[in-house]
Amino acid sequence: MAYGPAYELQVTAHARVLASRESAPDAEVLSGAVGELLLVEHDPVVTISNRATAEANLLASPELLSRAGVEVARTDRGGDITYHGPGQLVAYPILDLNALNLGLHDYMRLLEETVIAVCAEFGVETMRDPRATGVWTVREGEPHAKIAAMGVRVRKWISMHGLALNVTTNLDHFRLIVPCGLVGRPVTSLREVLGPLCPSMPEVSAALVRTVRHQIDARASRAVAARAAANS
């Protein structure tokens, strides 16, 4: 799906989650669904945030982008510049962070934990980098190559945007940009790490859904317990 129509689906999902919050008592929201998860593979696109320096990290000319079949789109998420395309699993969790008792920092760490767990399921060791948001493969105990990028926006404490995990992504397209504005940091994919053992997109998607559900169920249970204790 192209980036623009997928963004409109996010906006629609955000409105549904907000309406659910406003129409249900707090206890009912906490005991039921707290949001939606959208999964997509985008048509080739470079997305540029509103950060003042982000556009300078677009390296390719309009002519080169056209030859590569890569669109350029503005985005209201956080972060810098990134690439989306076929073979990359993009997940947009539209979640009521109030219901989950999640601040923005904790939510970003939850997204990273999710990707780390999914990669581990397929035998790929990954880690955080305290200097940069995202998930990285490991070399000699240090973060090496970025396998998943993240950027979010929160409106009325409901999340939009999310994460992008490279499964069989065309990594050459990352040469069109300085990915996430991080000079000299390589980008990788599950296929580059695992070769012929790389899982299929449906397998990775299923693992991500299971992991997100587990993470959100755990957070929702904690939020219910915390509010019950506060009201006792």
Image (tube, rainbow, N blue to C red):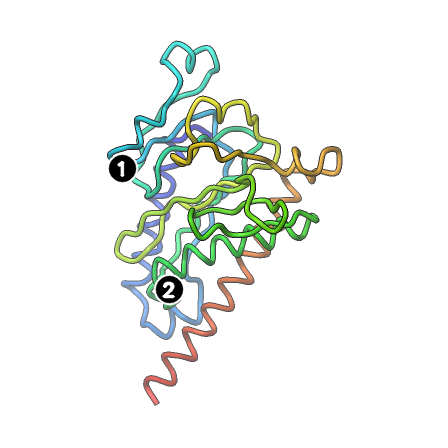
Q: Is residue 189 left or right of residue 199?
A: left
Where residue 185 appears, as percent x and y from the top left, is 49, 35
Q: Residue 20 is drawn in which quadrant?
A: bottom left
Where residue 123 appears, as percent x and y from the top left, is 70, 49
N-terminal label among 2 and 1: 1
Mark 1 belongs to which amino acid? Arg
Where residue 210 appears, as percent x and y from the top left, is 59, 56
User: Distance from label 2 to label 1 (Cα)?
Assistant: 24 Å
**Count of number-bearing discs:** 2
Badge 2, how many Cα within 10 Å: few under 14, some, many 20+?
Answer: some
Q: Could you tell me which residue is drawn at 43 percent across and 44 percent down?
A: 150
**Helix, strand or loop for disc 1:** loop
Q: Residue 127: give its label.
A: none
Q: Is residue 48 left or right of residue 199?
A: left
Q: Is residue 92 above or below residue 7?
A: below
Where residue 203 appears, as percent x and y from the top left, is 66, 44
Provide the residue designation for mark 2: 102
Q: Could you tell me which residue is drawn at 42 percent across and 46 percent down?
A: 132
Q: Residue 51: give its label.
A: 1
Contact between marks 2 and 1 (CB within 8 A): the answer is no
Q: Is residue 174 left or right of residue 161?
A: right
The extreme right residue here reads 196
The quadrant of the rendering that contains the C terminus is bottom left
Q: Is residue 179 above or below residue 19?
A: above
User: 178 and 29: which one is in front?
Assistant: 178
Badge 1, how many Cα within 10 Å: few under 14, some, many 20+?
Answer: few
Q: Residue 49 is drawn in which quadrant?
A: top left
Q: Residue 78 is drawn in which quadrant?
A: top left
Mark 2 belongs to which amino acid? Leu
Q: Is residue 130 above or below residue 12?
A: below
User: 152 and 177: which one is in front?
Assistant: 177
**Helix, strand or loop for disc 2:** loop
